[in-house]
Structures are given as structure tokens and as C-alpha cells.
């Protein structure tokens, strides 16, 4: 029987150490997660070190979804949570603890898949990559040494999802609503941005990425159902046709 944990995918972006990938698989298996995606780092899951650290979990390595880009990895998911251990630029979503982020993640899994994204061991996710995430998760640690090993971070997030999934499944079940995928949000955002540009809109201080981040976050935090987003897409497409110059 499928559970809400089956709707969560762990996404590792450009992992650098094969052993960490293998150990992450073991951490996932410990707490009921079974979907892994690796962005970049070709061949890292095929190494002996990765297989050794994934002891008894080699099937997770073999079934990992391999993507060339983060956009490709996030495309099917309705909610994307990024991980970071320090405060970033003010235009990014705030860092929040698991007690605020994980419950919303699990609620979304009632009808759609979600992703938790981890960056490379040496530098973490870039600001541009964090901007693709609706929520940013920080695991609190001792102030004098805030950095966690990649597999440790995966284990702590997986454990929190597993622990709180019991609280979610114990409630009165509500009718699951299908949420829009990340690709559908991006399609709407691209269309609206095109319409606004033709209407004379100019981004704040010429920074189109800042506007895109604010719009993306507003859409995703609105918790639209897929039928709601499709309605907005239909409206935007109609306005797009109306705004095109007619052939003479």
C-alpha cells in the first residue's frame, strides 16, 4: 500500500563523494523513503564505494532517477524544499525549521509528489538553485560547527518525514487534491511574464530574477489545485492571443 513517504523524492545536486550517495540511500531506507534523484555527477552511483556504503540498499542506487539539470529533476513535483545552513540573500525564502516545513510537505503528498533538494558537499545549493524552491529548510546544529555531512542531513530530514507521517496518516483522511507540477507553475509564470513585458512592465531595478522569484513563491504558497492552475493558464492564453498584433 502506497504511503505519503512514497511521494517524496530526495534530490542530490552534483554530489561529490560516492560514499555519501550510498550512505544517503541507507538513511532513506531506514526511514521509509524509496525515491532518489541525482543531478549531474555522472557515474557516481555506479562506483564500488557507493555500493559499499549503500549496504542492502543497492536497489535504491540502481533505481535512482538521473537528470542533467535541476529543472528536469523538479519538473514533476508540486512542492520543492531546498536545504541550506546559513542565511542567504533577502530575496530568497527564509530559512525555516523542520517543524514548519515538513508538515506542509506531507500535506502536499496527499495528492502529489514532492522533492527535498540537497546541494554539493563543498558548497551547497547556489542562490539560483535555492530560488527554485518554495521553502528552505535548515537543520539546527551547534553554533560553532553548523555544517552537516550530506548523508547525515538526508538522514535527519528522512527521520523527520517518517516521524511526522504517522501524525498525518492518523488524522481523518481528507480528499486528496492533485497539485500542479513544478513544470506547470513555470509554464504559467513564463506566459504571464511575457504578457507583462508586452504591456510595458519592467522588473525591479532591471532584475527579472527577483520578480520571477517573488511570483514563483506567491503561486506555490497559494497551494493551488491543478484545476485552478489550468484555469489560470486558460485565462493567460486567452489574453496572450488578444494582445498579439493582428496581421494587416
Image (cartoon, helix red, strand yellow):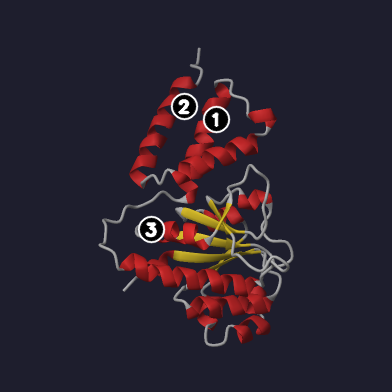
Q: Considering the numbered disc 2 on the image, is that residue within a helix, a strand or a loop?
A: helix
Which residue in the protein does label 3 denote? 107
Mark-to-mark CA distance, 3 and 1? 32 Å
Instruction: Report the residue at 68% width, 46% height from top.
Output: 89
Is 56 on the left or on the right of 242, as rendered? right
Which residue in the protein does label 1 denote? 194
- The percent position of residue 54, horizontal first and vertical second, equals 58, 83
Mark-to-mark CA distance, 3 and 2? 34 Å
Judging depth in this view, the residue of 192 and 109 nearest the camera is 109
Count residues near mark 3 (Cα–Cα under 10 Å), then give few for <14, some for 14-19, many for 20+.
some
| The N terminus, quarter of image | bottom left
Which residue in the protein does label 2 denote? 240
Quadrant assignment, res 212: top right
Is 149 on the left or on the right of 189, as rendered? right
Callout 1 touching callout 2 (CB < 8 Å): yes
Q: Which mark is residue 88?
A: none
Amino acid at each position: 500500500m502506497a504511503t505519503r513517504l512514497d511521494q517524496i523524492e530526495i534530490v542530490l545536486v552534483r554530489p561529490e563523494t560516492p560514499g555519501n550517495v550510498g550512505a544517503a540511500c541507507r538513511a532513506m531506507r531506514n526511514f521509509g523513503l524509496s525515491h532518489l534523484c541525482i543531478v549531474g555527477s555522472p557515474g557516481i552511483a555506479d562506483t564500488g564505494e557507493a555500493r559499499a556504503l549503500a549496504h542492502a540498499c543497492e536497489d535504491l542506487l540502481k533505481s535512482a532517477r538521473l537528470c542533467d539539470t535541476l529543472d528536469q529533476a523538479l519538473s514533476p513535483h508540486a512542492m520543492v524544499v531546498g536545504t541550506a545552513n546559513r542565511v542567504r540573500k533577502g530575496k530568497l525564502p527564509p530559512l525555516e525549521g523542520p517543524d514548519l516545513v515538513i508538515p506542509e510537505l506531507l500535506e502536499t503528498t496527499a495528492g502529489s509528489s514532492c522533492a527535498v533538494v540537497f546541494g554539493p558537499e563543498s558548497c551547497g545549493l547556489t542562490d539560483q538553485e535555492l530560488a527554485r524552491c518554495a521553502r528552505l529548510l535548515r537543520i539546527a546544529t551547534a553554533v560553532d560547527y553548523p555544517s552537516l555531512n550530506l548523508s547525515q542531513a538526508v538522514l535527519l530530514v528522512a527521520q523527520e518525514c517518517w516521524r511526522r507521517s504517522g501524525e498525518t496518516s492518523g488524522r481523518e483522511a481528507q480528499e486528496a487534491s492533485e497539485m500542479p507540477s513544478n513544470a506547470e507553475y513555470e509554464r504559467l509564470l513564463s506566459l504571464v511574464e511575457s504578457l507583462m513585458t508586452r504591456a510595458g512592465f519592467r522588473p525591479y531595478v532591471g532584475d527579472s530574477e527577483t520578480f520571477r522569484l517573488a511570483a514563483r513563491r506567491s503561486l506555490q504558497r497559494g497551494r493551488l489545485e491543478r484545476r485552478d492552475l489550468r484555469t489560470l493558464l486558460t485565462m493567460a492564453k486567452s489574453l496572450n492571443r488578444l494582445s498579439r498584433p493582428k496581421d494587416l
